[in-house]
Image: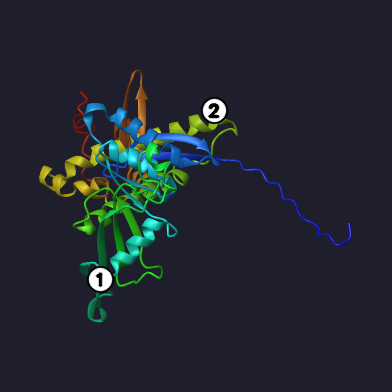
Amino acid sequence: MKGQKERAIEEYYVYGWKVLVLIDVHTRLPLAMKVVQIQEYEGRWLVPLLEQAQHNLGVRGHISTIVIDRGYLDGEDLWQVDQLGVLFVIVGKTNMAVTQDAQALAKRERVHVRERLVRHGHGKTATQERLRTELVGIEGLTTYDDYGDPQQTQYAHRRDYQGQPINAVVVRRWDNRVPANDGTVYLTNAPVSDPFVVFDTYDGRAVIENGIFKEGKHPWHLGRFPKKTEAAVVVHCHFTVLVMALATAFRLWQAKPAISPAQETDTRPSLSTALLGGEGTARWRLRLKQENRDKVIVFFADAYGIFHLAELAILSGVRLHRLPSDLGSPQAILERYDISP
């Protein structure tokens, strides 16, 4: 029709799934998980995941603190976490009133400072840089209207409404970098008298990005499910995360004798990093392949043994031009493996 503009209508379909995981930041072991469709709001699963994780732990452990991705930011859910007696740390969104209030108050509150020296380069050309981080702790903010019991937050539109108090940590400077938007704001129910405790606690969120999703997608093929059906995706994701957990637990158990109990206490905040030396699954597999490339497994009836190729050659009577001097005779090899000749 004349005078009307054509309007393009675009239709698209969304396929996919999201894996929601709650893990222990010290050991990188998953405590609870849920597989949902990609369009589903993951925030509704925060409290169920926390409750399931605590149920799975039973009496063996108690969850005292959680760090949360901003996608789970919901005031009523955070209030439930608080009522469960669990401390939380989450980044606030820039358009939230509580975030803007915290940023404004931080401009006239006492700043907590931490400095560290970083060395750049080597030898005579090496230089040192002093990196400065400035934080401000704000207590008792009441402008997060959604933070509270649903029976209370339903009256948030009233003029006399006052929300539940929540604390905040504002980052004014991070390693000499001054943020452009008045600083990142961490919302928390934890004490902020020393804001660096909250600031350092939130670093644990990187563990789930690197220890579960980055590792899961590359070495463990988490995103390559066998069939495009719900059952196939759910089984594949649960089985993959389970095997990842078993492999991590085995590596931690294998590496634990390498440190003393005193060292273990000192390295508790990053136990997995301390024991595994920051070695990911891909490098771990490559190292095992290199260490065992000259070994073979031999089956005989209901018994088996793992031998070096040179040891197998000696036991088989094969003559070799060059033999390692530490292998010894066939009898010595068998005695080394506690086998009677």
| Residue 5 point in image, percent of width and height | 81, 60
From this view, report whether residue 324 is shown above or below residue 192.
Answer: above
Three-letter residue code for mark 1: Arg
Extreme residue in the bottom direction: 124
Asked whether 3 or 260 is in front, the reply is: 3
Q: Earlier in the sequence, mark 2 or mark 1?
A: 1
Q: Residue at x 33, y 66 (%)?
A: 104
Q: Quadrant of residue 33?
A: top left
| Residue 174 point in image, percent of width and height | 31, 67
Label 2: which secondary element: helix
Per the rendering, the mark at residue 267 is none
Q: Disc 2 and disc 1: Cα gap in Å? A: 51 Å
Q: Left or right: 298 with respect to 200?
A: right
| Residue 230 point in image, percent of width and height | 56, 30
Q: Which residue is mark 1?
A: 132
From this view, report whether residue 246 is shown above or below residue 99.
Answer: above
Q: Which residue is mark 2?
A: 231
Quadrant for the C terminus, please: top left
Report the number of numbered marks: 2
Crowding at dot 1, Cα within 10 Å, few <14 / some 14-19 / many 20+, comes out as some
| Residue 204 point in image, percent of width and height | 30, 50
Asked whether 279 or 299 is in front, the reply is: 279
Extreme residue in the left direction: 262
Q: Residue at x 28, y 30 (%)?
A: 57
Q: Left or right: 105 with respect to 12?
A: left
Extreme residue in the right direction: 2
